[in-house]
Every structure is written in structure tokens, then in C-alpha cells.
Image (spheres, rainbow, N blue to C red):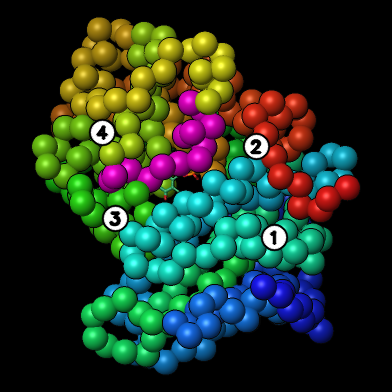
Amino acid sequence: MNLKTTKTESPKQLPDDSKLGFGQLFSDHMFNMDYSPEQGWHNARIEPYAPIVMDPATMVLHYGQAIFEGLKAYWTSNGKIQLFRPERNMSRLNHSARLVCIPEVDEAFLLYALKELIAIDKEWVPRAPETSLYIRPTVIATDPYLGVRPSHTYRLFIILSPVGAYYPEGFNPVKIWVTDKYVRTAPGGVGEAKTPANYAASLYGAEVAKGLGYTQVLWLDAIEHRYIEEVGTMNILFVINGTLVTPRLGGSILPGITRDSVLTLARDWNIPVQERSITIDEVMTAHKDGFLQEIFGSGTAAVISPVSHLAWRDDVVMVGDGKVGPVAQKFYDAITDIQYGRAEDPFGWIVPVEEE
Ligand SMILES: *Cc1c(COP(=O)(O)O)cnc(C)c1O
């Protein structure tokens, strides 16, 4: 497939790297591609960043048939821009696509188009320490039709957003609230897809948690309300008596690429790893018995997010000394060192944006 490029005639002013937040500013260009049953995916193009004008009946607005991804590009000290495991994001996009009846895309072509887009907007990759360019590929259903069925037409787009350091003043451990009342997703649902429905379903519980003074919700399984699933936009990991324990992927948990990177590093470092069912009661008992050493989340935005407090029913427990633990710190350092090119990449995780 060809990739047509139209450059902007009115570039925006570049932001100050030291004042970036998350997801508020967007680069000069975007990638677009359309799908129709007759032509398949076609009209791949890089063009100026612009609003999408659509009919109010457009299906995505009514039934949420859409999927997305989130990954980052990093500026390295030798002046190169690189991606972290982007093939994983492309294959997960297709996995999400299958779960909500969206036609799959050519993963290799999409990665090629992404590299071209970043190369055109390379001035938008921030350079201040621990900043990055957040990448949001998205697919939306575009038939103007109010009947409930999969759309026949789609738009795929990729937008780029320079983002600031997640921890400008060092780790900021989070307090999380465990709920047995609200659920994010259920077995047989679309919990392992990055699809808007899951995020809409999580908002109410997350607001309740905020009202109680917690940053995030830890979701339990939808049937017994005992088995730990994940947190907001992160997977969750526990260090119990020297073993790294994380819920196994059972269909209702998002298969995080950061989670997989942590598990790969742990195995490489000979830390015992268990991917298995784990109940909230087991975690509370481990804490009571003095075996619960660390809890942390993993995800692209924060990489590693240490948990300082866990609230479950009438108990609020402090994890360790409430600060970042040595295991969380070690994973954070190892992953970010590879992402920013400060360390060797023994696992083949890095993909340069421009070939030498
Ligand atoms: C994206 C996401 C994650 C983390 O996935 P990464 O690939 O590590 O960024 C975890 N849980 C949910 C619900 C997510 O949307």
C-alpha cells in the first residue's frame, strides 16, 4: 500500500519540554486510513492534524465500536528516536479488533506508517529527562446508521502527543481502593481488548474511589468478587515472600506489554514468578503475616507505579514502609534504561524510528 504525505503549511509552536503534562498537546501531523468492504484498508495518508467531521449517526458515537493502543517513542542521548516493543502493540490492536468485529490491519504496514509519521514530526519528540512522545493508534466505526450491527466502514488514525515525566519529583506511590461492588468487565466480555466500553464501565467506580481519597480502583473478578484482576490502566504485581505474583491473563485482564516486560526481566534475574489466580484475602493475610513486601502497577504511561496503601472493606494497610520498594525500583530502572537507550537491549525490544 502507498503512503501519501501532505505536510502542514502552518506548523504549531513546539511546547516547552519541561512543562508537559499528559495527552493535552498534539503534533502537527496525523496518520489516517479508511476501510470499506470493497477496498479493504485503503487511502493511507499522513496529513496535517485535523478534526474528524462526522455525521451525528456515525456508529462509533452510539455503540462504541472502537479500539485503540498506547505506546511511546523515546529520544535517546545519541540523538536517535526509538520505540519499545511496538510490534506487540500492533498485534494487540488486531486482537482487540477481532473481539469487537473490526477488520484487522496489516501490522507491518502500520508500524512502517507510524515510523514515517514520527520521522515527519520528530521535532515533537521531547528531549527533557523522562519525557516521551505518546502514540495513540485508534480505529472507529464510521457507518452513519442507527441499527446495532458491526459497521461496514472504519477509519484508523494515529495521533502523537508529547508527554512530560510521570514522576518529576521521584516516585509518587498511590493509594488504591479495592471494590467488591463495581466491576470493570466479566468473563466472556471484552476485558482483554483496549476498547472504549471498558473505560466507560470503569469511570463510576473510579469516581467513588476518588471521593474516598484513593487514586485508583483495584478491580476484582465479576463473579466471586475475590480474585484480583487489575488497576485502572495498569496491571498489578505483588512481591510476596520474595516471589513475584501477578494474576494470570484469563480474558478479562488487559495483556499489558509492560507486565510482560517485567515478567521477562524477573525470569532473567531468577526472581521466582507466579502467574496465577490470587485473591484479595490472600494478599491481606500475607500482609498480616509479614510476607507482603511490595505492590506495584505496570503500564506504558507510568512504567511502574508503586502502591503505598490498599483499602479493602474496613482495613487500610500500608505496604512496606509506604515508599517505593527495591523490586519496583529495579524494574523501573531496567525498563526505562532500555527505553531511553541508556542500557543494552538484550531482549530485542527496541525498534529505531529511522534506519541508520
Ligand atoms: C493499556 C492497559 C494496561 C497496560 O498495558 P501496557 O501495554 O503495559 O501499557 C493495563 N490495563 C489496562 C486496562 C489498559 O488499558
Which residue shows up at 46% across the image and 78% down it? 154
- Where in the figure is residue 130, as x and y percent of width and height? 69, 41
Which mark's residue is nearer the viewer, 4 or 2? 2
Give the residue number, with chain letter if any, for mark 2. 349
Label 2 within 8 A of ligand 1 by Cβ:
no
Q: Earlier in the sequence, mark 3 or mark 4?
A: 3
Which mark's residue is nearer the viewer, 3 or 4? 3
Inspect this view and state whether residue 150 appears: yes
Q: Earlier in the sequence, mark 1 or mark 2?
A: 1
- Span shown in magenta: 251-263
- Where in the figure is residue 85, as x and y percent of width and height? 61, 43
Which mark's residue is nearer the viewer, 1 or 3? 1
Residue nearest the viewer, comparing 110 with 295: 110
- Where in the figure is residue 137, as x and y percent of width and height? 55, 63
| Image-quadrant location for residue 27 | bottom right
Q: Earlier in the sequence, mark 3 or mark 2?
A: 3
Give the residue number, with chain letter if any, for mark 4. 228
SS at badge 3 = loop
Give the residue number, with chain letter if any, for mark 1. 112
Task: Please name the amino acid that badge 1 sits on.
Answer: Tyr
Identity of the residue furthest to the left in this view: 224
Give the residue number, with chain letter if any, for mark 3. 190
Residue nearest the viewer, comparing 74 with 5: 5
